[in-house]
Image: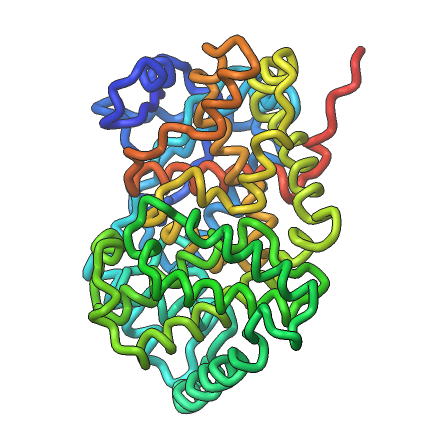
């Protein structure tokens, strides 16, 4: 079988199409869309080849099948899911020792009538089944239902519809009452040096927040962002404000503004006039953004405490993964003295928000928020898939400066939903391979 990335006529895609199949997991993956082979037909492996399938491969295959059963996707034709791997990865997991092509998937149609109907039915229940909502949301949430789904999955509002309205009003009121208590006149005698330092750093960072997005250059929105970040920092003195938190706040504003304007294209929000939003609605958006950011950061707070141990652990895990997945790229980076911490630290700190367009970040966050194991766990695999995405381009760069310039601003400006779906699909399969089998991350002993 030969697989390829349809619709991307690049040398890299052509190289992938020309590779021979190493191994495949057979599963009805309607979650990721039909498998595409550009006219080439999949052939079954011989019985001898099937018998050589390792226990690890069988386990991964079973997990993917179970995942799709839990998602509730209909069983259609079986498709082949291929994993992009290097010789190092093949040696680690001993899967036929032949190079494998990239995963070939097509995006889920998030805004299809069928999926919208599923979300409407699920969100309309008296008691929303959170497990079912997470499974359905993993593959993307329709724009008009994203705000409601995020509030529920983050635990901001109760699953019971009868209690939801009162709880939402209470939390919004609590936040608005906390603002004057915490957001004092910074230059007054009542504020201490810690408060002034925190506010000064936030005030410096806010104008830099997503500068290409017009709505975040609005003075009213910038003051709103300042209040949210300052109140959060004062309430969480163990970490306080850390640069990068301002980026993590922006998806919530975009999603809640889209809900207010009832638009299904997030890019339409960027140019909207904030003056058209009533002060009361802006207060609600600000309060919802505060509480959702709080819930998000609760799960990754060790990213921002002293020495940022959470990020350090993620960087170590990313290094182990890359040694297995793409040893050629890993050796190339090492040869040119390019350390993961020099570029991937920001990927961890800002969750790739400065590398991927904002309207695609919200799609990525559908999956992150739906992940029961937490954002940190899955994000490492996304970063691995993101780095592997640029293997061929990086291998053509032969000095530290060129590599760093490329990695600090990868060419994602033209990315579309297909690219994010492919990235998440790769990350999912990497996680299935390595998360439950940490022995795969150990380097093979020399003989």
Between residues 231 and 388, which one lies in front from this camera angle? 231
Q: Position of residue 107 (x, y in %)?
A: 30, 43
> How many badges with numbers are in the image?
0
Position of 55 with respect to 249 (left or right) is right
Q: Quadrant of residue 319?
A: top right
Residue 47 visible here: no
Residue name at image x 66 percent, y 75 percent:
189
Q: Position of residue 115 (x, y in %)?
A: 27, 61
Residue 415 position (above or below residue 262): above
Residue name at image x 43 percent, y 24 percent:
45
Between residues 243 and 328, which one lies in front from this camera angle? 243
Coloration of the structure image: rainbow
Residue 89 visible here: yes
Residue 286 position (above or below residue 371): below
Q: Position of residue 29 (x, y in %)?
A: 37, 44
Q: Quadrant of the N terminus?
A: top left
Residue name at image x 67 percent, y 30 percent:
320
Residue 151 position (above or below residue 209): below
Q: Quadrant of residue 447?
A: top right
Residue name at image x 50 percent, y 40 percent:
382
Q: Quadrant of residue 280?
A: bottom left
Q: Position of residue 67 (x, y in %)?
A: 47, 52
Position of 45 with respect to 182 (left or right) is left
């Amino acid at each position: 079988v030969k697989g390829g990335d349809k619709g991307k006529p690049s040398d890299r895609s052509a190289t992938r199409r020309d590779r021979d199949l190493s191994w495949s997991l057979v599963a009805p993956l309607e979650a990721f869309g039909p498998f595409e082979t550009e006219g080439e037909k999949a052939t079954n492996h011989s019985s001898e080849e099937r018998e050589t399938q390792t226990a690890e491969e069988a386990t991964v295959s079973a997990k993917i099948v179970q995942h799709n059963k839990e998602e509730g996707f209909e069983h259609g034709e079986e498709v082949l899911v291929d994993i992009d791997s290097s010789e190092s990865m093949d040696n680690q997991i001993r899967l036929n020792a032949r190079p494998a092509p990239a995963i070939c998937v097509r995006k889920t149609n998030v805004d299809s009538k069928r999926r919208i109907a599923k979300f409407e039915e699920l969100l309309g229940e008296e008691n929303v089944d959170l497990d079912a909502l997470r499974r359905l949301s993993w593959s993307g949430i329709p724009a008009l239902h994203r705000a409601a789904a995020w509030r529920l999955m983050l635990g901001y509002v109760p699953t019971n519809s009868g209690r939801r309205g009162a709880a939402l009003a209470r939390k919004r009121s609590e936040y608005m009452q906390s603002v004057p208590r915490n957001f004092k006149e910074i230059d007054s005698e009542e504020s201490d040096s810690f408060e002034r330092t925190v506010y000064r750093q936030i005030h410096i960072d806010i104008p830099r927040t997503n500068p290409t997005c017009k709505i975040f250059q609005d003075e009213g929105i910038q003051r709103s962002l300042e209040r949210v970040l300052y109140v959060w920092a004062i309430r969480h003195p163990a970490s306080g404000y850390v640069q990068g938190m301002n980026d993590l706040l922006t998806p919530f504003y975009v999603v809640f503004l889209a809900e207010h304007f009832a638009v299904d294209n997030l890019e339409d929000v960027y140019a909207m006039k904030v003056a058209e939003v009533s002060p009361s609605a802006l207060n609600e958006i600000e309060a919802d953004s505060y509480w959702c950011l709080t819930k998000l950061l609760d799960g990754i707070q060790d990213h921002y405490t002293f020495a940022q141990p959470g990020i350090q652990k993620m960087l170590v895990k990313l290094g182990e993964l890359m040694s297995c997945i793409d040893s050629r790229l890993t050796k190339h980076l090492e040869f040119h003295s390019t350390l993961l911490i020099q570029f991937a630290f920001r990927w961890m700190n800002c969750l790739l928000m400065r590398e991927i367009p904002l309207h695609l970040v919200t799609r990525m966050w559908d999956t992150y928020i739906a992940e029961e194991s937490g954002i940190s766990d899955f994000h490492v695999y996304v970063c691995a898939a993101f780095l592997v995405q640029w293997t061929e381009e990086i291998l053509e760069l032969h000095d530290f400066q060129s590599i760093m310039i490329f990695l600090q601003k990868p060419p994602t400006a033209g990315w579309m939903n297909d690219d994010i779906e492919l990235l998440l699909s790769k990350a999912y399969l990497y996680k299935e391979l390595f998360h439950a089998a940490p022995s795969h991350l150990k380097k093979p002993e020399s003989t």
